[in-house]
Amino acid sequence: MQQAVSGARSAESSGYVLYFQLASNGARRACSLTIQAESADEAARIFRENWGTIESMARDGVSTAMVGSASVSLAMS
């Protein structure tokens, strides 16, 4: 696993967008995730705390060729 997260950027009312990369079979995939949060720090904290789930969902998408503009939801309870 390789993860390089850039700073969260506000996407106005749609949340904060975090960018990261996945390395798989010698290739890198650029990924982004929008997180609804009160601040960029909170969005980064949510990202870190849920990295295992996020990585699994992203890898599943890459392996099934479900990449592109597909929307993914992460529900927290």
Image (tube, helix red, strand yellow):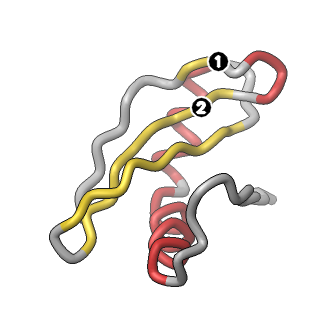
Residue marked by disc 2: 17
Q: CA distance from mark 1 to mark 2?
A: 6 Å
Q: Is residue 30 above or below residue 67?
A: above
**Image x and y of residue 66, in percent:** 60, 72
* SS assignment at label 2: strand
Q: Residue at x 68, y 39 (%)?
A: 35
The residue lying toward the viewer, choosing from 40 and 77, is 40
Q: Quadrant of the C terminus?
A: bottom right
Residue 75: quarter of image: bottom right
The answer to whether residue 34 is left or right of residue 59 is: right
Q: Residues within 10 Å of mark 2 (few under 14, many from 20)?
A: many
Residue 42 - label = none
Going by the numbered disc 2, the residue's amino acid type is Val
Mark 1 and mark 2 residues within 8 Å of each other at the beta carbon: yes
- Mark 1 and mark 2 lie on one chain; the one further toward the N terminus is 1
Q: Is residue 39 above or below residue 55?
A: above
The answer to whether residue 64 is left or right of residue 73 is: left
Q: Residue at x 80, y 29 (%)?
A: 14
Residue 10 - label = 1
Going by the numbered disc 1, the residue's amino acid type is Ser
Q: Residue furthest left?
A: 26
Q: Is residue 9 above or below residue 24?
A: above
The residue lying toward the viewer, choosing from 17 and 70, is 70
